[in-house]
Amino acid sequence: MRKGRTVLEAKRYGIHSCQRTDSLLHVARKMVASDISALVVVNPMGELAGIITRTDLLRACVANENWEAQPVEAYMSTDVVTVTPQTMLRDVANLLLANHIHRVVVVREEEGRTIPVAVLSDGDFVYHMVKDA
C-alpha cells in the first residue's frame, strides 16, 4: 500500500444501499446480485442510518424462522465506523484492525447531514497491496 494515499485517491465513489424498512430477503437478494457483503442503510434523505452485513443476515436466519420478512432495522448496526475522503489509508487500516471490522463507510458532511459516499473494505486494501507490490 503506497504511503500517503488518501481514501479519495484509492476508492471510487458509490454505495449499495437500502432503507430501514426493507425486508431482509430484499437485502439478501441485493447482496447476492451485486456480490457484496454489506449494504449501507440510509434514511429517506440519503443520510447514514447504519449498515447491514451478511453476518447480520446469518444472525437473523438463526434467530428467526421468518427471517425473510424481518425489517433491516431489526438486525442492522447503527454504530458505524466512518471516515472522510481525506483520511489516510494507513489510518483506515488501523481503524479496521483496532475495531475488528471489515469495512468503514466513507462520508461527507453536507449541510449538517452525514451522507455516505463509499465503503472501503479490507478487500480494497488487499487489492491495493497487490497493485502496489
Image (cartoon, rainbow, N blue to C red):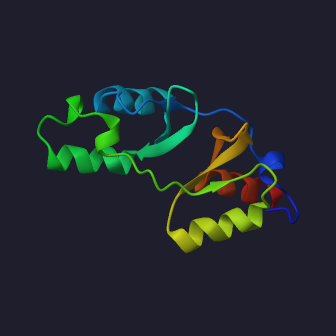
Could you say where residue 82 lies in the image, as x and y percent from the top left?
62, 54
* Residue lying at the far right of the rendered structure: 4
Could you say where residue 21 lies in the image, as x and y percent from the top left?
35, 29
Could you say where residue 61 lies in the image, as x and y percent from the top left?
20, 43
Which residue is found at the position 57% from the left and 27% from the top?
Answer: 45
* Residue lying at the far front of the rendered structure: 112
Comparing 45 with 53, the one in front is: 45
**Is residue 133 visible to the viewer in this orientation of the structure?**
yes
Q: In this view, does 67 lie above or below 80?
A: above
All told, the count of numbered labels is: 0
Comparing 131 with 65, the one in front is: 65
Which residue is found at the position 50% from the left and 68% from the top?
Answer: 100
Comparing 124 with 133, the one in front is: 124
Q: Quadrant of residue 68?
A: top left
Quadrant of the image containing the N terminus: bottom right
Could you say where residue 29 lies in the image, as x and y percent from the top left?
37, 27
Which residue is found at the position 62% from the left and 67% from the top?
Answer: 95
**Is residue 37 visible to the viewer in this orientation of the structure?**
no
Q: In this view, does 74 lie above or below 95?
A: above
Which residue is found at the position 47% from the left and 45% from the top?
Answer: 50
Q: Is residue 77 above or below residue 20?
A: below
Quadrant of the image containing the C terminus: bottom right
Say whether residue 106 is left or right of residue 1. Answer: left
Q: In which quarter of the image is residue 33?
A: top left
* Residue lying at the far left of the rendered structure: 65
